Image (cartoon, rainbow, N blue to C red):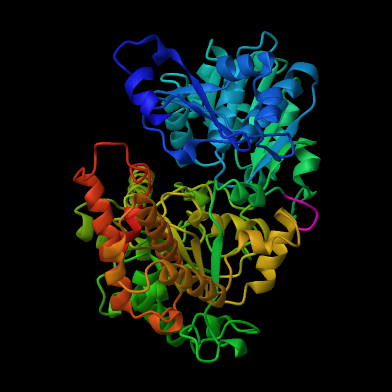
Amino acid sequence: MNRYQRHSYGANIALFQYVQLFIISNGVNTKYYANNRKQSFKQTFFWADKDNQNITNLPEFTDAFLEPCHLSKMICKYIVLAETAKVLMVLRPYQYYAAEAIVDRVMNTNKNGYIWHTTGSGKTLTSFKAAQVLMKLPNVHKVVFVVDRKDLDYQTTKEFNSFSDGSVDGTDNTQALVRQLGDDTKLIVTTLQKLNTAIGKQRYLASMEALKDKHIVFIFDECHRSQFGETHKSITEFFTHCQMIGFTGTPIFAENVSKNQLGKRTTEMLFGDCLHKYVITDAISDENVLKFSVEYVGRYREKTGSRNSLDIEVEDIDTKELLDSPQRIGKIVDYIIDNHDRKTHHRTFTAMLCVSSVDALTTYYQAFKQRQHSLNIATIFSYSANEDDKDANGYDQLDESDGASVDESHINLHSRDRLESYIGDYNATFGTNFSTKDSQSFYNYYNDIAKRVKEAQIDILLVVNMFLTGFDSKTLNTLYVDKNLKYHGLIQAFSRTNRILNEQKSQGNIVCFRNLKQATDDAIALFSNKNASSIILMQPYEDYVAQFLEALTKLKELTPTVDSVNLLISEEEKLAFVKAFRDLIRLKNVLSSFADFRFDDVSMPEQEFEDYKSKYLDIYESIGRGEGKEKVSILDDVDFELELIHQDE
């Protein structure tokens, strides 16, 4: 299909350039994808039913996907011309079902609802398409997409406009929001705080009064976090004819609800029915997000002889002094310095370290500063009085200080002075000029850190609450944890690491310096099911050793020695070797992220592995030189996954 695309469908001004969808099938596996010249196989999708069960056989796929009404809907409504990348994108099945459920709810009822799609599954594209369809409905006055942080306001506006240039005007301030609500702007992106100000301040009420009974659809991002305060009540009381749609990767249930001044309120109590569900096990099965590799470092009986047997307290401690003691934190910092390159594939990727309080963060920062290493360490935290750990219950009590803003009326001056000092170190490292002296400079600092983490210029980012939710970076693969996390707070934090990037990033690494085993099991049970651990979590180190030994046996059956690779004559024999050694590379890539990995465990000297790798590369190079090109080679389309090789080097 790629060859057809190069030579026919994309050639010059050929009519085939207007093809929007391709379908590929071998009869038992059938997939669809958008006509995109930058396509990779990872952007091909199975169709599925509403319950996320894949429809793979060609006859069943034909009945479901190629049904004329459905196919026309996919082409007319659910293909996006991404303006920034200049490529076509098509919705995946779960995105389609969510968008359709939202449109149906708004067209045919006056009820609210929410979408439960796991973190990292592309909620922004889903919400954009739903909003785009809704704003064209004759009975909808406006669609307002509401985020709960200033940085997400900017980020969402940017992403929406990348899907369709000029589709959204950002609301820089409340005055701009009130103006857009009153003019003919159909789709608005704003923050919860601006919306609350618009309906709560006397000076805006005259302009807002005319909107009270208009049919406005509010779409709330991360609705597990933002919708549990007085603001939710204010919005529903002011707009008498509105509908509210929530998006969340981790809903609030009775098991993980926190009490505020308005009582205990779940996502269902506030938004009504769940309109569509796509949980973390679905996303991992579809290879849309990665599994987690969770390692517990500390004084555990079962860890005798392991490199993770660090002499630090991990549980059953009543005193904060012990957990935050410089001695304990110093040992953790030494462990991180010793193992960071292993976890991040020699700093190809980046990491975050989340801790329980600003005081603990300060101790960590000083410990890193006092030691010899070449890691780029940065930190950011709100210097509002409420920044310390909220028992890590999911941040539903945090206001915009969770993002890039600070509650100026409740400033902790001591925290502010410390952060000013750390920003000074950052400025010296990167040649910048940020400060905490005004909110705009702090906001710029926040955005600069986010950018440098994504570009892998920062090795470890120290945080308390910031960046643990709503921050997406494909280059971040490791989270060091020294705070108590539970339920949605735990899943949200872990999920910073599991964005798919390439073959080299095989899992999200979670390194716990506290005993979060039960909390992890409880969170997995709540947000998928109690038997889902084997799907969501990587297997133990010993299991991958066993898989490596099995793959090594298969390799040795084909090529007992390194020199025997030279005796492979036919392309079929070379292909068999490439596939066998590629399996070994993949497993070694996973094993090397474990602190306990050593070649002695896998019955293969490191030099022998390197020698086989050289032969593997020789075959790759022979294809590049065009040897034997009088016919199409079966090796031409083999993915040698060279990023795994380059990482080793």
Q: Nearer the viewer, residue 592 or 331?
A: 592
Which of the 4 quarters of the picture holds residue 170? top left
Q: Nearer the viewer, residue 275 or 254?
A: 275
Q: Nearer the viewer, residue 185 or 617?
A: 617
Q: Residue at x 61, y 77 (%)?
A: 515
Side of 378 relative to 32 (left or right): left
Q: Locate the N terminus by quadrant.
A: top left
The spot of residue 347 in percent (x, y) is 32, 63
* Most frequent secondary structure within the magenta stretch: loop
Determine if residue 171 is in view. yes
| Image: 394 above or below 201 | below
Stretch of the chain drawn in magenta: 252-256
The spot of residue 288 in percent (x, y) is 55, 46
The spot of residue 444 in percent (x, y) is 34, 44
The spot of residue 95 in percent (x, y) is 62, 32
Q: Locate the C terminus by quadrant.
A: bottom left
Side of 473 relative to 520 (left or right): left
